[in-house]
Image (cartoon, helix red, strand yellow):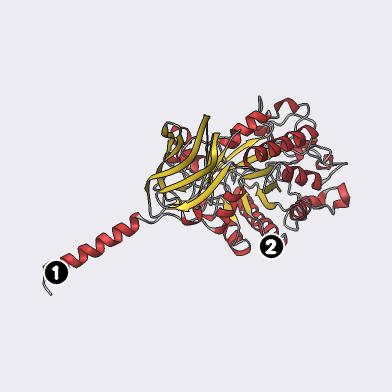
Amino acid sequence: MNNRFLLTVNLFFFLCLKIGAQHQVPIPTPAQLQWQNAELAALVCWDMHVFDGEFYVQKEVRITPVEDYNTFNPENYDMDQWIKAIRDAGFKIAIFTVSHETGFFFHQSNATPYSMKALSWQDGKGDILRDFKASCEKYGILPGVYIGTRWNAYYGIHDFKVQGDSEFSRNRQAYYNRTIEKIVEEIFANYGEWAMVWFDGGAHGPEQGGPDVLSVFEKYQPNGLFYHNLQRADIRWGGSETGTVPYPSWGTFPYRAIGAGESAKKEIGANNFQLLKKGDPDGVYYMPAMSDAPLRGKGGHDWFWEPNREHTIYPLDDLVNMYYNSVGYNTTLIMGLTPDPEGLLPQPDVKRLKEFGDEINRRFSNPIASTSGAGKTINLKLLERQIINQVVVMEDISQGERVRTFELEGKTSKGWRTIFKGSVIGHKFIHVFDDIEVTRMRLVIKSAIGTPKIKKIEVHKN
């Protein structure tokens, strides 16, 4: 066997490996698929400062312990009312803030005294997290839990840490870390499965001097979505709190985690978080963006209830536009909801949520025509010539995001007309355009990695 032959064989295998590598795309986990299929998630924000009657100032809440935690007395508390409103809005996931910056935990904890056991309310036997989980199961909503460890006014934790470098501060930090590990074990081990877990601002791990929450999660919640710390992020923040992302927003990302604050890589925060907003088509990790915004965000930014703030509830048109620029751009929309001191979602909020759910259902539940298929060209034939102004395209992302560039075309009385030229389709792409009368639609995929698999093409008229 001569050297020339060996060289030829090696070159052949090198080219095969290179071609194979070029056709590999990151594949989402079942939890990530469930997350993107849900499309709409509610983040229910409650904390002790809701009950003090004062306007929420975040920088003060982070450093000021609550004066009297027994101001917590929601006399008309009705968890089913929260979750029913979430269901009626079309949300498929609900996430509850079991703790936030005051450091109070809304579950029955043996690891921290600053929890439901301390309250006069319900004789210290209440458990908001338990009620939340049960109501989600009752109404068919996937449950998630949001855990704040970065700020804790009760334990004196500021941006993950006890301030200072004395023996006292080191001992306090070690105590806090052990406490958090015990708390998350309670939440993960005692309440069944969570569809997703969200650590506020990320969670410092042992390498950064923080608690080891990831190993606890992986032990007790192996099927859940983890968001996030410096070791792992299953989804990524969409770069703003407007409930929108720009187009394109790829579901892939070049880094395994996104960091938080000063721990984030410079290239992630550069150019106003463009990498978070748009992702990277060549990213080796599947990590879709989420688009988050509070429902009370018009002329304000209220993640938590405050008195006399109904005027900040987004108008319906704004919410619909948010949907198009989040769900319609391959991300999951997270809407912040705010129970009041009575223990109810305020009626104006409930009304707007119902209007939103009804409007999205009206727009998308009855397509004029739909189809699916694989390959470079997918044709959709209408029963008759009709006016359309909206197209929905969904890729089968269980096989990864394969489409790289595409065109949408409609057949008019004057022949084929290009309606849109784009790049990412991902879980869902929605395009709205001026009325056009067509007999056929087609998706022409100009470039792809492997064989494109299209789950659905729909046309609508609104």
Percent across and percent down for residue 74 are: 84, 41
Q: Which residue is mark 2?
A: 189
Q: Is residue 173 visible?
A: yes
Mark 2: amino acid: Ala
Q: Are marks 2 and 1 in contact (CB under 8 Å)?
A: no
Marks 2 and 1 sit apart, C-alpha to C-alpha, by: 60 Å
Quadrant for the C terminus in the image: top right
Within 10 Å of disc 1 (Cα), the crowding (few <14, some 14-19, many 20+) is: few
Q: Secondary structure at mark 2?
A: helix
Q: Quadrant of residue 216?
A: bottom right
Percent across and percent down for residue 8 are: 17, 65
Is residue 9 shown above or below 303?
below
Residue at 34% x, 54% y: name it. Answer: 22
- 381 sits left or right of 138 in the view: left
Indicate which disc residue 5 carries: 1
Quadrant for the N terminus in the image: bottom left
Q: Secondary structure at mark 1?
A: helix
Q: Quadrant of residue 200?
A: top right
Query: Of discs 2 and 1, which sits in the foreground?
Result: 1
Percent across and percent down for residue 178 are: 64, 57
Percent across and percent down for residue 428 are: 53, 44
